[in-house]
Amino acid sequence: MNMMLSTVAGIALAASTSGLALAEQEGAPKYDARTFFETTSFGGGSFNHNATKLLIHSDETGVFNCYEVDLKTGERTAVTHSQDTPNMAVTYFPKDDRFIYTADGGGDELNHLYVREMDGSVKDITPGQNLKAAFFGWGQDDNTFWVMSNERNPQSFDIYQYDATTYERTLVFENEGGYSPADISRDGRWLALGKVRNNADDDIYLFDTTNAKAGPALVTRHSGNVSHQVETFDPTSTVLYYSSNEGSEFQRTWTYDLKSGKKDIAIEAPWDVMYVGFSWDGRYRVQGINADARTEVTIWSTSTNSKVDLPALPAGDIVGVRFSRDGSKMAFYHNGDRAPSNLYVMDMATKKYRRLTDALNPSIDPKYLVDADVIRFKSFDGMEIPCTLYKPVGASPTNPAPALVWVHGGPGGQTRLGYSANIQFLVNHGYAVLGINNRGSSGYGKTFNHADDLRHGEDDLMDCVYGRKYLESLGWVDKNAIGIMGGSYGGFMVAAALTFQPEVFDCGVDIFGVTNWVRTLEEIPPWWEDFREALYAELGDPNDPEQLERLNRISPLFHAENIVRPLMVIQGKNDPRVKQVESDELVAAAKQNGTPVEYVVFPDEGHGFRSKENRITFAEQSLKFLDRYLKKAN
């Protein structure tokens, strides 16, 4: 196994030093976990009926709640007051200041929709047990809205039309065909549906609510494997926008004329088009491009087909763009490596804007945080692996830093530029972090995205191993202190690394990672049923004897006797995706080896950290673990 650690000449493309000049400074203060996580997270952004307020959510109390932001004064007022379950803002009503928000049951992902009335009372408009519901859009008359719910069949989402005054509802689409509802035209006539064939091939169907007997009609007939994803209907309900990689390595945006059936390419770039949307009044189109781990957002005037000038902001990305109903105002968030997302509002006529939030804890001086660089290294077969690299302040050949390979979730996720309290906390405490986009990650074309199909735990794991090799090639990294850390699918990669390459990494932190793929695939949440075939195509079908053998072979639980390096496991008790038993059994098996194992279970979490206190506890415990086994501190 030691041969896996040798440095291979030429495996890495040179890392840029732009944005890392501060890494040579000395004396940067060390901030504790509470200081980092007292930073506030903001989200949402619905304008009220007269564009005087925004509805957002914030975790400033430690738990997400809904807030109204006065656009004149900037004052933020709490309008929900949960002390445990996150309340997430959805939308104001179009004619008054009632609003809809969503909440689940302590991380179980069984979300309901709630209306907060004008008098402050709250009504659950999706009552019932063991159901999951989501808001689906407003009708053009402002008197109706749509909701999708799996109450009738846990495996399928039906669409209901609600009266905006009485909340009485009508079933408008009974989903009997394994479709994934994606969008509805504002006039309520057309429902766009996705249907998955495998993880590389899916289709779009249109359902005409005025001719329900006809059923959904296929609009993306094609041959071979082609990805099709619904983006949006245009404001006039005459055109469907969708993305497709047909004839291209990347996702391009296409239009489909609902009357003639004509298709045209509308937007293309040398990267994936992430999304397209419109202001309610139709004057503006917003589009996002996934450009090498960052989002490039542009706003277009639909009347002139010209770009709208956006304000000059610090380095970072504009995200979460929303418009007022009349198109006079635009709200957006801005996020950078050293700046968490802050909310802005801009007057579309004057282009004057103001920042409405200050997310970063004022106790943190951002000059001591670190910008990431995008780098690439060559893996075992010559494939280039894109990554984000964070170099801690003061790291040098005479003061080498311990390091982590940080693996994203997914499996088809992407590590991107932007603020991460977890990463900045670790970097602030002296750790280099390599955010690896192993093969199978999204954002780099369909060939790269599918390069690990039915090879998970093998080729992508070797990318992580070569990530260590890359770190070893940097003169300022401690070659004898490199760990691996990740959540969800990234947690699986941690367990796989310590199981199947047991001498490569010096320790690992597995955050709610899969350990038994057979059980996980057999027990996926019922609302994922539409994606079962895609999961099987990517990971393996447990009903196929040959693939079942492979799933057992790559499941860390069945080979835990190989684990010899220190392991930390984090788990949420209410996780519906990776059940607690996955972590329980791995921990028990690893302990039988005499391996140092630390196990933390959060009783009020699901698949992730929703409570600020839990995020603080996780950060503190993981840092102590890493210091103990990478810095060799007591």
Image (tube, grey):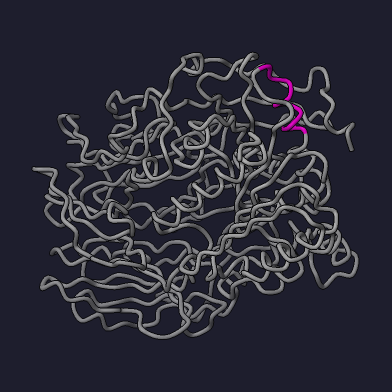
Q: Which residue is located at x 19 percent, y 32 percent? A: 353
Q: What stretch is highlighted in magenta?
A: 466-475
Q: State which quarter of the image contains the C terminus.
A: top right
Q: Which residue is located at x 69 percent, y 34 percent? A: 482
Q: Which residue is located at x 46 percent, y 82 percent? A: 151
Q: In which quarter of the image is residue 443?
A: top right
Q: Quadrant of residue 237?
A: bottom left
Tell whether 603 sits left or right of 476.
left
Residue 175 image point, x, y percent: 52, 77
* Residue 245 in sight from this viewpoint: no
**Magenta region includes residue 471:** yes
**Magenta region includes residue 623:** no
* Residue 220 in sight from this viewpoint: yes
Residue 208 image point, x, y percent: 45, 71
Q: Which residue is located at x 39 percent, y 82 percent? A: 171
Total numbered labels: 0
Tell whether 9 sits left or right of 205.
right
Work out whether residue 429 or residue 343 is closer to the camera in this orientation and state it: 429
Work out whether residue 443 or residue 357 is closer to the camera in this orientation and state it: 357
Q: Is the magenta stretch mostly helix, strand or loop?
A: helix
Q: In which quarter of the image is residue 327?
A: top left
Q: State which quarter of the image contains the N terminus.
A: top right
Q: Please tell me whether residue 611 is drawn above or below residue 354 in the rendered image.
A: below
Residue 565 image point, x, y percent: 76, 47
Work out whether residue 108 or residue 31 is closer to the camera in this orientation and state it: 31
Quick one: which residue is furthest to the front in this view? 634
Residue 529 image point, x, y percent: 62, 72
